[in-house]
Amino acid sequence: MAVRDAGSLLVGLLVLFHTWGAWAAVEVNMEDRVEVFRGETASIACMFTSSEGIGAMIIQWFYVTRGGERQNIYYQDATTKIVARGTPFTDRISVNGTGATGDVVLTISNVQLQDELEFICLIGSVTGEAGEGRTKLRVFETPDLPTIESVQTGISVSEDSLSKIGTCEVKNGFPKPNITWYRNNTPLRTAQDVVKVVPSITSESSGLFSVKSELSMKVVKEDKDDVFYCEVTYFVPGGTRMTETNRVNITVYYPSTAVSIWVESPKGKIKEGDSIELHCRGNGNTPSSIISIKHTKTDQTWEGNVLVLRNVTRLNTGDYTCTSMDTDTFEEITDYTTVFVNYLKPAVVIPENTTVVVQGDELKATCNALSPLQTHTAWFKDGVEVSTGHTLILQDATFDTAGAYVCVVTVPEIEGMETRKTLVVQVQGPPEIMEKDHTEMEQIFEKTVELSCHARGFPAPSITWTTSDGKVLKTASQEDTEEGVQSVVTIKVDSDITAFCNASNEHGTAAVTFNIKAKGSGVIIAVIIICILLLAILGSVLYFLYKKGKICGRSGKQDLTKEKSNKDNIVVEMKSDNTEEAVLLGVNGEKQPPSDQSGEYLDVQK
């Protein structure tokens, strides 16, 4: 306790001597400032020299309070080192060195913002020499990343006052960071009635600073594509650093000075049946503008900047006017475009629909379809092109000439633009039967056969069926075809038949012959042959048994014995297995007495 009081007394005396300037013989050198980040350790060096040498020096450290007073924090002499109690640095400082080398270092750990003070190193000796040096401790804190927020609503160039563009903010820096606004890489400074930058600073409870900056401008149309951002500069030990915010755009509303209207689709020429899409656009974008499209010819108006006309006809041809009106100023701007709908009228064929040409004569037909564009005409029959051009000429007409001729008119410039018309040609003449003149066929006896006959001619021929004996056959079916008439008859074959197909109209007749030969059924013949074979086999067996004498008798044996007798004495002996009685029958079937029986044999006497 005595040592501490003595030290305090000595400190007081040294301060007093220093005030009188009595110790000018000691020279002290220190840096003007020491810079560290908050939370780091600061080292403040104090170097000194003395005319009496540097032994037995008294070393003291002070800091200058916010009120300008000195506050002792450390005392050291040859035998004593004392850290002053009750100061903000009591537990965070240490001093390295005894002074014997002419330098000492004050170390402050865990530096805080309130440590940003001026520190004094006082060197003295008991002989009366003294000197001091000063160093300012600077403390830094890197701020958070800056943010930028632009206005979300559009800004009209018609506004008289300055319009807010956005706000930039950076938080928790020390010392206070600086914010600079940029537009397209050009810094913005406050200019009367053009640009206004309003900064604001907030001191946080932590002692750190947050800075906010608001930008307002007189917006013009050219600002619609501009990008805005903020640059933040902040101090660090030994210099400054810079960071930037994201880039933002603003929506600028400006009135139209011109409008344009055009056909968006289809590209190229328009034909009837297409869907037309008209677009109208002004070079402004104010929400207060209203766009409408009007068909000048019909005075029909549609609101909106897009008009779709579906399945258009030539009536949709004409001028279409686009009008943009500003509802704030009621100013109107217009533009127009001309729409032409190309058309192809229905094809007209002369002669129309159906025409009749005499067999061997010539037919001329024409086909036309009106269009403002160049057309191409072709004729088709059964899907095959048979002629090109407006005129179809059929020479020396035959039944093969008859049929449907389709005239197809197209516009080569526009795909899918076509019209078609059908001309039916009938060739007038006597019937012609498609089957060959004479047909030979066979059919099984008692079976039916179906005969078909196809005749063509105009007028359509009638068909009858007859046989060679003059019998008229009933037709099973008869129907019209594209080329004429087809008839079918069913005949039961019970003998050889000759049938005739007869076709006739007012110009003549035609006939063809069908010869049908009846033939036996293969199954019946096979059955007959098998029966004959079975009968032959049966006869052979019976004959064999007869020759062997095995037709009758108990023992299975029979003998035929021819003896001399007259023809009236023919006797047959029959014996049964069930009786011992033998009966002899005469030729006339009369019973013979037993005396006349001759055992088990049949005797024939003549």
Image (spheres, helix red, strand yellow):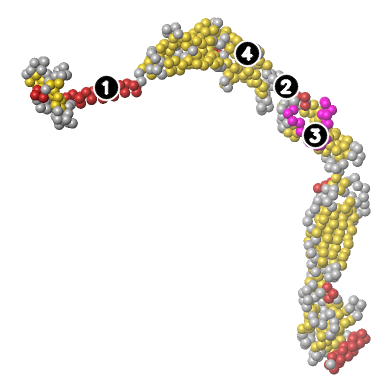
Q: Which of the labelled discs sits on residue 372, or is there none?
A: 2
Q: Quadrant of residue 576?
A: top left
Which residue sits furthest top? 507
Mark 3 to mark 1: distance in Å? 105 Å
Secondary-structure class at tag 3: strand
Residues at marks 4 and 2, CA–CA distance in whole angstroms: 29 Å
Q: Which residue is mark 1?
A: 532
Q: Which region shows up in magenta?
A: 294-312
Disc 2 secondary structure class? loop
Residue 204, image x, y percentages: 85, 68
Q: Residues within 10 Å of mark 1 (few under 14, many from 20)?
A: few
Q: Is residue 582 visible?
A: yes
Q: Is residue 357 above or below residue 258?
A: above
Quadrant of the frame with the N terminus: bottom right
360, above or below 197, in the image: above
Q: Which numbered tag is attached to residue 344?
A: none
What residue did someone put label 3 on?
261
- Of pointers 3 and 2, the one earlier in the residue sequence: 3
Which amino acid, mark 2?
Pro
Task: Name which residue lies at 89% across and 39% down.
Answer: 327
Q: Residue at x 84, y 80 (%)?
A: 88
Residue drawn at (14%, 30%) of the image? 580
Q: Earlier in the sequence, mark 2 or mark 1?
A: 2
Residue 297 counted in the magenta span: yes
Q: Is residue 91 left or right of residue 571?
A: right
Residue 32 visible in the current orientation: no
Q: Nearer the viewer, mark 1 or mark 4?
A: 1
- Measure the C-alpha gap from mark 2 to mark 1: 92 Å
Q: Is residue 428 left or right of residue 414?
A: left
